[in-house]
Structure formats: C-alpha cells, structure tokens
Amino acid sequence: MEHIMRLLLSAALLLLSGPVLAESLVTENLVHETVLDNGMKVIVKEDHRAPIMVSQVWYKVGSSYEPDGFTGLSHALEHMMFKGTESHPPGEFSRIIAANGGSENAFTGRDYTAYFQTMSNDRLEISLELEADRMRNLTLPAEEFAKEIEVIKEERRLRTEDKPTGQLYEQFTALSYRSLPYANPVIGWMNDLEQMRVEDLAAWYRRWYAPNNATLVVVGDVEPQAVFQLARKYFGPLKQEQIPVLKPLREPPQKGEVRSVVKIPANEPYLLMGYKTPAATSAERPWEPYALEMLVAILDGGNSSRFSRNLVRGSEVAVSASAGYNAFTRLPGMLTLDGTPARGRDIGQLEKALREEIARLHSDPVTEEELERVRTQVIASKVFELDSVFYQAMEIGTLETIGLDWRLIDQYVEELKKVTPEQVREVAQRYLRDENLTVTLLQPLPMDDGKPVRSSTGGRHGS
Amino acid sequence: MLVLLLMLLPVQLWAAPAIQSWTTEKGARVLFVPAPELPMLDLRVVFDGGSARGAIPGVASLTSALLEEGAGDWDADEIAQRLDSVGAKMSASSQRDMASLTVRTLTEKRALTETMDTVAQVLGAPRFDPLAFERNRKAMLVSLNHDEQSPGTVAQRTFMHTLFGEHPYAAQVEGTQESLARVTREDVITHYKKYYVAKNAVIAIVGAVERAEAEHLAELVSSGLQPGERAPELPQVSDLQASRTLVLPFPSSQSHILMGQPGMQRGDPDYFVLYVGNHILGGSGLVSQLSDEVREKRGLSYSVYSYFSPMRRNGPFLIGAQTQNAKAAETLEVIRQTLARFIEQGPGETELTAAKQNITGGFPLRIASNSKILEYIAMLGFYDLPLDYLDTFVDNINSVTSEQIRDAFQRRIKPDQLLTVVVGNEQTPAPAN
C-alpha cells in the first residue's frame, strides 16, 4: 500500500500538470459529511494511523461579530464554557476529559470560537455528550464570572499590555480598518472587559450557540457512520435558533497612506506595514487571493525566499523580515510585511528595503523558478500536514466556519498551480500601493531598568 | 451516567512503536521507527554539545545557527535553494544538553537524495564563513535585546542562571551581551570540532523507508563526521544551601513569579513518582492543585503551572505564574502554601487515580504522530534510556502510590531551599526573614 502511495506521489512531483497528491492522500476521498435535522453540520475525516481522534466543535462567532463596547465577549464566553451546565458543576467538564486521558482546550479568533478534545478513539462519545450539553445548557454563574474576568484581564496583560509588539499590533489594526470589526482585538479592549457583565455573556450565548450555527469536525481512527450516529444521539435533540443575519461588511477604499508611531519601553525598533487585500470569501476575481498567497511565499516562503536572500543575507538590512497573508478569512484582511532592522541599520533603511521589494514586484514578473519552488513547497507541506490530526481538523473547521467549503483544501493546490507571473504582478500593482497602506513603527522608550536588584537570602518560606 | 460508566473502561492496549537501533561505521548511535503510512521522513541528529559544553555562553547556539550558512561547495543561498526546491524543512538549535539538527522531507527519491546530501554536508563540512559568523553574532545580540523586553523571559533567564550557580548549566543558552561581544569564529570551530563527532551523536529516524534505506541514510548523514569521543560526564548540580529571593524591577503591569530548585535527572530512580506527583501539583493544566488554588478559586493568574525538566543532570523543578503587580504578594503566598501542603500531605487517592487515568489513558496521544515519535526516540537515545521505555511507561505510571509521592517530595523538594524570582513593578515586598 505505501509503495503505491509513494509511486503516485513521485509521479505527482515530476508531472506538475498531472494529479497533485496521491489519491489516498486527497482530502475529498477521506472525508464524510452529513447535516443533522436541526441544521448542525458534521464532518468526519478518517486517519487510521493511530487509535486516537480529535473532536472539535466550531461556532460561527468571534470577535468580528462583536459590537462596540462589547469587544472580547466571544473570548470571555469561551472561558465561561468551562464553568458549568445544569448537569455538570464548574470544572467538571475538564475533570471528566482528564480522567479519560484526554487533552482539551478552546480557541477564539476573529471569525470563530472552537472547542476541542483529543482522546483515545474509544472516548469519542464522552466528548460529544459533554459538548452537546454545554451547547445549550450553560449556567454562567455570576460568582464564577467575577473570578474568570480577572483571569481574562491577566491574559490580556500577558499577551498585550506587557508586550511591545502586542501593543503595536493593536494600534496598527485599530488604525487600519475604518469599518471592519477586525479593528478590535480578539481578547477585547481592557475598558470593555472592565464593563462586561455576565448578562452580556448570557445574551451572546443564546444568540450564537445553537446547532444550526455550529460544525462538528472529527478526525482520526473513527468510523464515519458511527460518528454520525453518536452526533445524532447527542446533538440531534438540541433546538435550533434563529441566527441573526449578518450584514455584508466592506471596508471603504483607503485614499492615502496612514502612518503612526507607538512609543513604549522597549529595546528594539520594529516595523509593521499592511496593504488591504481581498479574501477568498468575497474576491471579485477568484484567482486573486491565490496570486497573493503566491506573492507572499515568494517574498517569505523558506530560506531561499527574497526576504531571506536579499534582506537578511544580501544587504543585511534586517535581522528578520516576514510577509503574511491569509486568503481564508470571513472578511477581507491585509497583506502584511514586518521586520526588525539589523544592528547598525535603522528602521528607515528597513522600510526602504521592504518598499523596494514591493516595487520590484510591480515592475518585474516573478520567475518561473520561484513559482515552481513555491508549488513544490505547498505540495510537500500538504503531505507534512497529514502528520497532525489536529491540523487536519483545524483546516476543515476554519473553512466551514468562514462560509467556504472544506473541498477547497484540495482545490487550493490546483488554484495555486494556475497562478502566472503576470497575475502576481497584477495583484501587486492593484493592491500593494501606497494609498492602500498602513505603517506603524515601534519607537522604543528607555526600559528604565537602572534600579538595583533587590535580593534577600535565607529565611524559610514554607509553612 | 454514561460518562461514569465509560470512565471504568480499561485503557485499551496499544503497543508502542518498535524501535530499531544500531551503530554507524563512524560510531553514531541510530534509533529508527518505520512509519510507512505517509510518504515522508523525519530525521534528527543530536550531539552532546549544547550550552553546557560551550567554552563561552552562546557559542553552542551560534554553531547551530551557522550550520545552514554554508557547507562544502555551497553557500547559504545554495543550501536554502536545495532544500526549498524539494519542499524540505531543516532547522538547527541548541539547548543546555543537546545541539540538534532536524529535517523533514518527502521520501520521493529526488527530494530524499537532495535533502540528505545537504544534511551530510551541513553536518560534516560547515564553512563557518567569517561574514556569516559576524552577521549571526550581531543577530543574536538583537535577539537578546528583544527577549529582554519580556518580563517572562527575564524572569526565566534570571532563575536559570541563579539556580545553577557554578554549574555549566548556568551559562545562558542564547549568550549574553558580554559573551557575544567577545566570542570568535575560532570559538565556534573549536566547539564544532570537539562535539560534532560521531561517537557524540545520536541519529533518530522516523519515516516511510525500509531498514536498509534507513541504514544508508544514517551512514550518509554521519559520513563527514570525525569519529571523535563522547563528551565527558557533566558534574552534579549542587542543591541550594538556603532560600533566596530576587526581585527585579520591570516596566510591566504584571509580575512574573518563578519558584523552584534543582529537580531531577533523566533516568532518575524517582522519575515516575515525581512525574505523577507533579502532574497533580501543577502539571495537568486546569485540573491541577496550583491551577485550582491560583486561577480557579482566586482568578489571580491566566497561566500557573509546575514542571520538572529532567536533563543529563538535575534540571529545574519550577513553579510559575504571572499576575497584576498589586496581587504579586498574594499569589506568591498561595503558591507557597499550595506547595507546602502538597509536600506535607501528598496527593489524595482520588486525585492520584484521576492523574493515572489521564496519563495512561492519554498514552496513545503521546506517540500518535511521526513528529512525536521522533521527539521520544531522540530523547531516549540521547539520555541512554532503555528502548522499552514506551512499552513499560503505562506500568511504571500505574505502580506509583500516594505514599511514594509524599515520600519523594519530602526527600527532594525543600521549602527552605527555594529560589524565588519576581520580575515586575516591584510591588512584591522582599520576604521578611
């Protein structure tokens, strides 16, 4: 069996116009889906390498759904999902999962909130029973919320307040978006956390946590029909909700470069630039997001990419420089460039060098060799991804939750393969323009750490 | 109801991967696990050449960074091009014990050949080009500055440096402003020549190749190494003589608290007992005692944990948390009390049962991917642990008793020999003696 797979894959690598991945590795051949009567989607991907499974429940709600004054609500609700239902007191969810050998957690993003358990494959039923319970029966006790909101503020201090690049990123996004809620941090503004009430969470929970706004994704050593049956048993009886219809938000065209400076105690300067770009969910020209992915990989995909070769080595202007773009977001986002200047170089020189790389994309087509390198890297990484059941589930869950189809996982490689040098130049010229740019610089203030270390030795600190 | 019922299910039996082992012609030890399902291969070469072996702090990390910067006939651009053009990923890094190089590639013939030829050159004939040396040295200085913007990193590095005192583990892995100012290219070459030798190396391979192919790859990647000698034994880590508290001012809204002492080493007779005990104390996320006291009951910290980091010699036993400055003293006190109570009383039987169920029930998760198996076998090989480590893991966990945990914590964790580091806005009063 493995020989056949290897042969097919070799063929794929040699003949890039032919099939891309071995049939047995193509997502579509391994995925099974169904929709329950109450509208909940269930997607199962088989991976029989080890007797484990990951189970993820994805909700179509995240920080980009939150109105002003209520930022951080989705993330706070994610924390409170561990704080008890009518049948399980606070903390019991985690204790049951732990006692069954599971590891669990949850994550909130701009476009989604998701909960997962990774367990031995014979424990799937436990995960589904508990997730179905907390989808509709959360109790949200006020005294638990009072403690948990303090934990969330500590999380915000840890991730943002005390992190120079975290603060810079927050100012950058707030400044970049005029209309889109991507302007707000996922964890919420500190003021909104201070004003948050448990009633706000209860309303948010009622509005979005329903089977017809959720997707269950199970990947691992499982039998699809058995998963569907369990899903029907536990999620099937849950009542639907009228889910609010979202307005199609669009960012008004930017009419000029926006620049800002963040001055905070720090040791090293840092630069972040972002150009507004279309996303796969709403691009008028469907090929553009793929051309942008290709463009980013040419700048920053591996050690032979242009940034590594020209900026880190080459001119040695940057100690690090990277480019980022995510085609798979609910609302249109940005293509970003960021970096730290090398010792003896300044941030102005770094910005100039990054802009020169963009200018080169405007004027010269990228080479066939560069495109070929990226295609090969993408095909390889598609194989590497299969080593992680968690990642495979993430991929399916993300696409479904932003309103796309998981079949894009396979189409992605095909679409990237079609991108031409001219298309890369076209998206560079159309989107990577100064009028469409936001730039934020970190200007370090002294860390004020001149005070002597206070030290004491000896003494007993035990009981 | 259902949940309770299922909790009584026995852990399903699942065999750990069979590890094959041999020695290359030059003397490198190889550990290999065939993984035929995916057309890919992971390979890691580990040398006993981490920062504990460095003649000057940072030299091990610098050596790692320079491997991909030029080797044999190829400069950095050519090495990068060779790997990227077949979609392979390579990285090198150093910690206190280990200096390692890891690569992941497709097993399609051209990809495998290009990648492994590159690895062989990178390990056997690195150039340590003077210009690349200088660029990387300066980059490490910038990176050091950057790290020192983080109160958590400052706390961690201060803790380790102070904990290990005169021991080679005290040397900062990333180097210091002072050491990176004086390190030379010759220091790197000396470090490489002494420690990047076959008898000081372990090669771990997991992937879709037959044994014969794995043998060929192991010979190939070690072909450029000198046979050399194993690095000498490291000295033992001394216990702290008394408790010590360091309070470092930092312009942050939180205080980062670290508390601990030298813990245990790989292969330690108390390993499984301390591992299970720590799981209950602070190693099991939200359900641990520390998390319950600090986070769940009081909302003091987002992340609170404890761990043993067993190394060639006693690595740290460490408890960590972060809290707003005004709550630092309270958090520290809760941590102290929780630890003291655990040492005195040990775990309850229910807690112990739950911990064992978590660890043994989760055993399949530990070895469910090629990358996790690679991690395990590289560790087993490097620390000379028995190859049936994974086969006996579940039994070893199950045999731990609460009395053993109480006894081991009382023997080994000394409340009057704790190092405490607090980095933040200095609102933690230094403890009254």
Image (cartoon, rainbow, N blue to C red):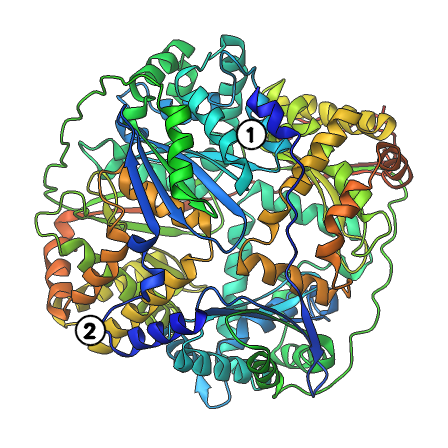
In space, the residues marked 1 and 2 are separated at their CA atoms by 50 Å
Q: Quadrant of residue A204?
A: top left
- On the same chain: label 1 and label 2? no
Front: mark 1 or 2: 2
- Say left or right for A130 vs A60: right
For numbered disc 2, what is the local secondary structure?
loop
Image: A174 above or below A86: below
Q: Looking at numbered disc 1 in the image, what kind of residue is underneath it?
A: Tyr
Residue at image mark 2: A17
Q: Residues at badges 1 and 2 in contact (C-beta under 8 Å)?
A: no
Q: Which residue occupies 71% across, 34% down?
A: B355
State which quarter of the image contains the C terminus of chain A.
Answer: top right
Q: Quadrant of residue A70?
A: top left
Q: Is residue A189 at all visible to an observer of this figure?
A: no
Helix, strand or loop status at disc 1: loop
Q: Mark 2 belongs to which subunit?
A: A
Q: Amino acid at mark 2?
A: Ser
Viewer-proximal residue among A211 and A114: A211
In the image, residue A89 above or below residue B197: above
Q: Which labelled disc corresponds to residue B302? A: 1
Task: Look at 24% across and 51% down and name the residue there.
Answer: A408
Q: Chain of mark 1?
A: B
- Residue B371, quarter of the rendered image: bottom right
In the rendered image, residue B260, in percent from the top left (x then y), is placed at 77, 40
Q: Residues within 10 Å of mark 1 (few under 14, many from 20)?
A: many
